[in-house]
Image: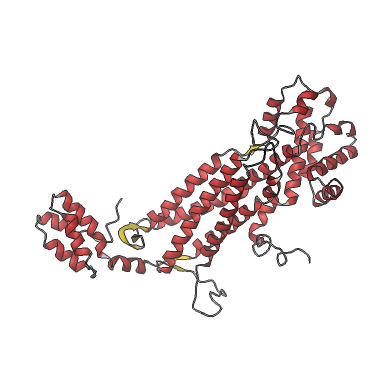
């Protein structure tokens, strides 16, 4: 069966292929192989600048870089063909580059390709490169777009009073814009934390000690060389390490990403609830069907889709951050197959981000429903009244309001007004209390 969006096993490359296509540039097998070639080539170029007599006269850096800047599907296919013989993906990359050296008449330098390295020196730089570039090119801009859209709505709705609910019950009124602003602040903080985590890489030979480098050229400062090389890739070299990167900072990246997603789950559930309360209506898209049986349905499908995909992403991020830092002794292979799935939670997250943006674009404020809820819940001004009475040293104000509001009967504007009129306080205080309504008792 030919692979296409209808035959793909994963919905990331199937149903949602259109939304996740930008990530192929970073997390596909092709992208990983290309990054491996890049690391190998850049390492070789760095060696040519390190004063090794064996590499004197090697000045074709820009020509060598074409091996990855012009990397093609055919090149990746050639590497996969070599891998059928080697049964080793990174060794296949090395042999591919040596083929390129032969074609360019540089065969005499070819043994300095992959010189002194182990596979994880390549994998633990190539994969972090994919993470770093995907975050900066795709994920961060989309996060910013969500934050920007929410901020616009927070500004638009900043003066709209709304009944708050704690434990699902009416509580002191708030403002709709402020409640959206809460999510803006939370998302900005988590994005800032995510951006502050350095993207880690490992580069140190078979067991992290640069043994081979040291024995071949004992008079060279290989630690400084490795630090500089990795920094040149825009990554932070972890040192000391075993054969592999210990993944602690990579786990921190996934945890911070997961927290951002978790806040979005909270947002989706709140918006879903506001829609169910009719605080929001949704713009009807011509031709869409909400239910196969109920023609009237306009469901909050975008927020439900986002919630589901965010849950999938967070579950995988959790496994990644728990699994990757754990490896037996100097290394086992369990990280290898797990690392190949790094793009999956990015994919589910991107699907969710797009769904949230689509859902936000459909929201229509229903001021009538919001105001009606406030009018039907005059009991929420009880807090305001008892607080003013406390200020005035009125005896037992909390208990007095409790006796009024916890009778099981409906508390109306009239019953509140009658209660205020019955108080033994100055007319000035009564006037102040009469001015308090669910619509204006919204705090700062």
Picture quadrant of residue 402: bottom left
Residue 440 % position (x, y): 27, 58
Residue 191 % position (x, y): 52, 46
Q: Which residue is found at the position 56% from the left and 78% from the top?
A: 292
Q: Would residue 50 be visible to someone looking at this image?
A: no
Report the number of numbered marks.
0
Q: Is residue 252 left or right of residue 270?
A: right
Q: Is residue 72 left or right of residue 158?
A: right
Camera-nearest residue between 322 and 258: 322
Q: Quadrant of the N terminus?
A: bottom right
Picture quadrant of residue 373: bottom left
Q: Which residue is found at the position 77% from the left and 21% from the top?
A: 218
Q: Which residue is found at the position 18% from the left and 57% from the top?
A: 399
Q: Which residue is found at the position 61% from the left and 48% from the top?
A: 320
Residue 418 % position (x, y): 14, 66
Q: Is residue 99 left or right of residue 207?
A: right
Residue 434 % position (x, y): 18, 60
Question: Residue 144, relative to residue 409: is it above or below?
Answer: above
Question: Residue 282, relative to residue 35: is it above or below?
Answer: below
Q: Would residue 429 be visible to someone looking at this image?
A: yes
């Amino acid at each position: 069966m030919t692979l296409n969006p209808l035959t793909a096993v994963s919905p990331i490359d199937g149903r949602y292929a259109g939304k996740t296509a930008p990530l192929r540039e970073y997390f596909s097998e092709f992208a990983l192989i290309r990054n491996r070639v890049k690391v190998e080539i850049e390492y070789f170029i760095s060696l040519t600048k390190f004063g090794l007599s064996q590499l004197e006269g090697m000045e074709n850096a820009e020509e060598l870089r074409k091996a990855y800047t012009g990397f093609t599907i055919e090149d990746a296919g050639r590497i996969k063909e070599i891998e059928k013989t080697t049964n080793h993906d990174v060794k296949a990359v090395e042999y591919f580059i040596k083929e390129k050296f032969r074609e360019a008449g540089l065969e005499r330098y070819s043994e300095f390709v992959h010189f002194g390295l182990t596979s994880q020196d390549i994998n633990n730089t190539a994969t972090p490169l994919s993470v770093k570039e995907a975050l900066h090119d795709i994920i961060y801009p989309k996060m910013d777009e969500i934050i920007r859209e929410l901020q616009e709505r927070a500004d638009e709705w900043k003066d709209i009073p709304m009944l708050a609910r704690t434990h699902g019950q009416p509580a002191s009124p708030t403002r709709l814009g402020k409640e959206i602003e809460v999510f803006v602040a939370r998302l900005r903080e988590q994005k800032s934390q995510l951006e502050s985590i350095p993207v880690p890489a490992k580069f140190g030979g078979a067991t992290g000690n640069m043994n081979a480098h040291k024995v071949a050229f004992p008079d060279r400062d290989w630690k400084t060389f490795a630090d500089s090389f990795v920094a040149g890739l825009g990554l932070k070299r972890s040192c000391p390490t075993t054969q592999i990167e210990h993944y602690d900072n990579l786990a921190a990246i996934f945890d911070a990403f997961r927290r951002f997603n978790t806040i979005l789950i909270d947002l989706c559930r709140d918006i879903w609830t506001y829609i169910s309360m009719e605080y929001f209506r949704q713009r009807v898209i011509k031709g869409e069907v909400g239910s196969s049986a109920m023609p009237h349905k306009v469901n909050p499908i975008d927020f439900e889709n986002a919630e589901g995909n965010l849950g999938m992403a967070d579950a995988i991020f959790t496994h990644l951050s728990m699994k990757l830092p754990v490896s037996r002794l100097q290394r086992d292979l369990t990280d290898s197959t797990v690392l190949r799935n790094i793009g999956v939670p990015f994919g589910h997250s991107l699907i969710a981000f797009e769904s949230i943006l689509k859902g936000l674009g459909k929201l229509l404020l229903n001021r009538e429903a919001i105001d009606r809820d406030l009018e039907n819940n005059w009991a929420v001004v009880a807090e305001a009244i008892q607080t003013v009475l406390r200020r005035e040293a009125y005896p037992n104000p909390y208990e007095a309001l409790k006796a009024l509001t916890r009778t099981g009967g409906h508390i109306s504007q009239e019953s509140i007004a009658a209660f205020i009129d019955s108080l033994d306080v100055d007319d000035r205080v009564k006037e102040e209390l009469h001015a308090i309504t669910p619509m204006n008792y919204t705090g700062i």
